[in-house]
Image (cartoon, rainbow, N blue to C red):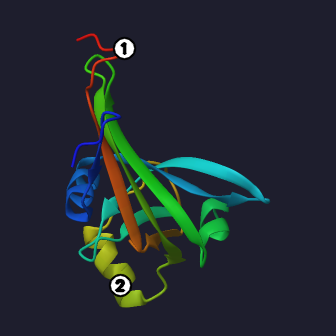
Amino acid sequence: MFQSDGFRALERQECLRLLAKAPVGRVVYTRQALPAVLPVNFSLDTDSSVLLCTSRDSDLARAIDGVVVAFEADEFHAEHRAGWSVVVTGRAAVVTDPAEHERLLRTGPDSWMPMRDGVFVRIEAGMVSGRELTGASVHGTA
C-alpha cells in the first residue's frame, strides 16, 4: 500500500525478509534512565527473534536482560532517495539454557568484537513494523 507521503508500509513477512539481509542493526534501550542506541551485528533465529552475541559482563547485556527494547535496521540509497527501515519491539533476554546456547554457537551470530564469556541475547519479535521510502520526487520534480 502506497501512501501519499512517499512511504509504503511493509507487511511483517516483508520486514523479516529485509531484516535477514541487513548485517548491522541498532538496539534501542534505556541506560541510566536515558535513551541509548548501540549498533550491533545480529542474525534472525528460526522463530524470527533477533539474536545478538555480546560479553556476559557487558553494559548492554545487563541493561536489556528481561526488559522490552526496540531493534532497528535499515538500508538507504541517498542518490535514489529510496530505502527501507524495520523496527522489532519485544522483550530481550540472555539465553541461559545450555542446549540452546550450544545450538546458537553453531547457528547464531558471531560478535564482531573480541570477547570472553560470550552470551547470546534474544529479542522477541513481538511487534514488527517497517516502511519503505519509494524514491518519490522532492517538491514535485523528478
Position of 130 relative to 97 (above/below): above
- Reading the image, the residue beneath label 2 is 100
| Residue at 52% from the left image edge and 75% from the top image edge | 91
Total marks shown come to 2
Q: What amino acid is at disc 2?
A: Glu
The disc, 2 or 1, on the residue closer to the chain's N-terminal end is 2
- Reading the image, the residue beneath label 1 is 139
Position of 70 relative to 120 (above/below): above
Say which of 69 and 96 sits in front. 69
Residue 56 visible within the image: no
Q: Residues within 10 Å of mark 2 (few under 14, many from 20)?
A: few
| Residue at 56% from the left image edge and 48% from the top image edge | 38
Say which of 118 and 33 sits in front. 33
Q: Disc number at residue 28?
A: none
Q: What amino acid is at disc 1?
A: His
Q: Do tag 2 and tag 1 residues touch (Cβ < 8 Å)?
A: no
Residue 94 visible within the image: yes
Q: Could you tell me residue 138's position as x and y percent?
A: 34, 16
| Residue at 30% from the left image edge and 14% from the top image edge | 140
Q: Residues within 10 Å of mark 1 (few under 14, many from 20)?
A: few
Q: Secondary structure at mark 2?
A: helix
Q: Could you tell me residue 128's position as x and y percent?
A: 36, 64
Q: Is residue 125 left or right of residue 61?
A: left
Q: Quadrant of the C terminus?
A: top left
| Marks 2/1: CA–CA distance | 52 Å
Say which of 137 and 29 sits in front. 137
Q: Could you tell me residue 104's position as x and y percent?
A: 32, 74
| Residue at 60% from the left image edge and 79% from the top image edge | 66
Q: Could you tell me residue 79's position as x and y percent?
A: 29, 16
